[in-house]
Amino acid sequence: MKNKFYPRPSNALIFALSPLVILLLSACSFSLAEDITPPPGYQEPVIQDQPTEMTGPFFPVVAPDPAKGAPIYAEKCAPCHGDTGMGDGPRAEQLSVPVAAIGDPALARQKTPSERFKIVTQGNLEKFMPPFASLSDPQRWDVVAYVYTLSMEGDVLEAGEKLYQENCARCHGESGKGDGPDAANLSKPAGDFTNQARMAEDSASVLYDTITQGSAPDMPAFADQFSEEQRWALATYLRTFSFANLAESGSEQGTSVEVTPTPLAADVAATGLITSTLPATTTQTGPVVVRVINGTGGENPEGLPVTLFGFDSMQLVYTDTLPSQVSGITVFNEVPKPAGRAFLAGVDYQNTTVGSDVTVVEDPTLPVTLTVTIFETTTDPSSLVVDRMHVFFDFTDPEQVQVVEVFVISNPTNIVVVAAEEGGPVVSFPLPEGAANLHFQDGALGDRYLETPDGFADTLAVRPGMGEYQVIFAYSMPYKRKLELSLPMSLPVDSAVVMLPDVGVKVKSDQLQPGGEKDVQGTKYLMYSGGALSAGSDLAMELSGRPKGTGTNILTGSDNRTSLLIGLGSLGVVLVLAGVWLFRKNHAEDVEDENGEEDENEVYPAPSDDPEALMDAIIVLDDLYKAGELPEEAYQQRRSQLKEALNRQVGKGL
């Protein structure tokens, strides 16, 4: 049934979502059926390819929200663990093993969020708990946060808050960020209880021990000042600082925040929007539920057009648009749901297009639920940071040098950076004086990119995420045996990698350190690395010497249709890979293999514990796959491993 009061989705929306559709349809074959607890007597099948064991640490990029985790818990966890988490759900008696009482304060005190996240992600089939593949990482963190609230009694939180404000806030700050009025007088920084990396690895038991014993030289021991009950109350309250909205609301009200689990089905039923049902017999039509969540923490806008797309074998076969409700739930009734159909929901919000994950129908009798996370926007790009900047040189033309720059940029906030006006600039990239013949890997001036007085600007919005946004461009500079090159930075840069083909040209710079040599497809490259660069600064260097040989051409064509092959062709892939190699070489103490040897024939880098190297490795994989150098199965598996490793590491130092 089509809704005649709302327009069909624009071609722009379909076009914007199509890359996401292609990627996710090729990678996803899951549904909510994967999260169903096996029946009694279930015998685990022999699995040939076991997933790689997850190793910590794990922590969320943004603060998890217990309120968002409540409906997830009610739908997926409460049937076994019970509404209060005491292991007394309606399915618990049907299982042959006891269900963990995750809401028991004594048990909760011993568990870290990192450990619980791992269990939710991997499952525990020995106890009939499945891995929750249909949940995104933020959703898993939200439900982990909610589980902790089950063991946080209101009077305990209230007592803990009072103790904190009277004894701890002057150093640790009212909101637990380590910024209290006395913090500046301490010999070392006060603990920041909003630091996700720290709090994900600290159990309440660890916090209790620190409160009891103190932490030299500034924090006294409270063993004599507080009773055991008070110390546990304080340790319990400290956890709330790492959750979104919880500690703040509690502080304002002077009481704990109670989050009541409400099953998703009840939420949907309460809207009164369902007008069709799905009989358990034959028909393959029924409701599809789309939940819109505000990832920034604000209210869900009412009346926001929500578009549902259905795909059969990569072909768009169904689409409809309805307004979002104040509850954030939109129900599409009488939707054809044959097995194998893939559904995706999309929303245009504040000049950005947002898509849900893809859900593929395996059993038409099961519910189809999609979640779209929207974010508030800002026109201020100052929160963005360049994780890695790559600079390559090519001397194919003896009269000029071609310069290729690769920027990998992160948005560590929960706000999307957008243009001040539709189609306007979002992130600006100044060019050195004398730059000409500008080209891009993706897009062109007047299309995605806009010309500015000192360079160009990108019109794409930058969504929250680490290393998800990248720009690759090239230009030429006149060269006659010498060039003073100054590359201006509009954003702060964490690190830079410069690669110069060994054709007789030398580079001199106080900001670069030699990184050795690397053979790339028969061409020797001299490699250099640079440290942090502040916004508004320059990366200055001097090139000198007459180039010998023809070099390696990284551009093709000679007119305005010239395209940049870096990042698409095999040479560009290997060049970026070599940059990753240099970074790993410079950080060998952290990422060196146990045998101390490096595989020179490595096709793509293995996951390390360094976020920058992981982000570059993902870029390399994407380029290898686009160039046809990797089979899809290997690409999807490796990319999943890299992103998993990256998710464990991002957030450090934020």
Image (spheres, helix red, strand yellow):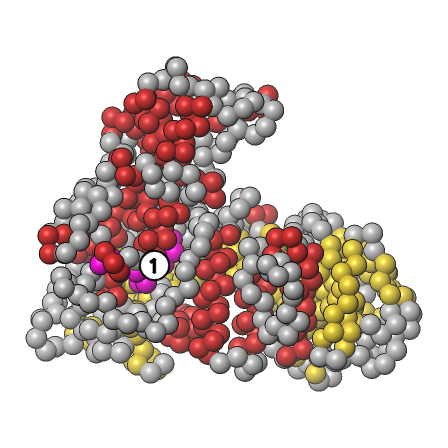
Q: Considering only vertical position in the picture, is 462 above or below 341?
A: above
Location of residue 316 by image quarter: bottom left
**Is 286 displayed left or right of 608 in the figure?**
left
Callout 1, which amino acid? Answer: Gln
Q: Considering only vertical position in the picture, is 594 above or below 252?
A: below
Image mark count: 1
Q: Is residue 280 magenta?
A: no
Q: Residues within 10 Å of mark 1 (few under 14, many from 20)?
A: some
Q: Nearer the viewer, residue 481 or 195?
A: 195
Residue displayed at 71% across by 51% down? 531
The single residue placed furthest to the bottom in the displayed view is 557
Where residue 581 sits: x, y (%)? 66, 64
Residue displayed at 53% across by 46% down? 652
Where residue 283 sits: x, y (%)? 12, 77
Residue displayed at 55% across by 44% down? 653
Location of residue 225 by image quarter: top left
Where residue 494 sits: x, y (%)? 65, 51
Q: Main secondary structure of the magenta part?
A: loop
* Viewport quadrant of the N terminus: bottom left
Instruction: Name the residue that disc number 1 marks.
Output: 122
Q: Nearer the viewer, residue 153 or 593?
A: 593
Q: Is residue 140 magenta?
A: yes
Residue displayed at 10% across by 78% down? 282
Q: Report the magenta residues as a range.
A: 128-141
The single residue placed furthest to the front in the displayed view is 595
Q: Is residue 132 visible?
A: no
Q: Is residue 639 visible?
A: yes
- Looking at the rendered structure, the secondary structure element under dot 1 is helix
**Is 362 displayed left or right of 651 in the figure?**
left
Location of residue 234 by image quarter: top left
Where residue 206 sits: x, y (%)? 41, 34
**Is 565 displayed left or right of 423 in the figure?**
right
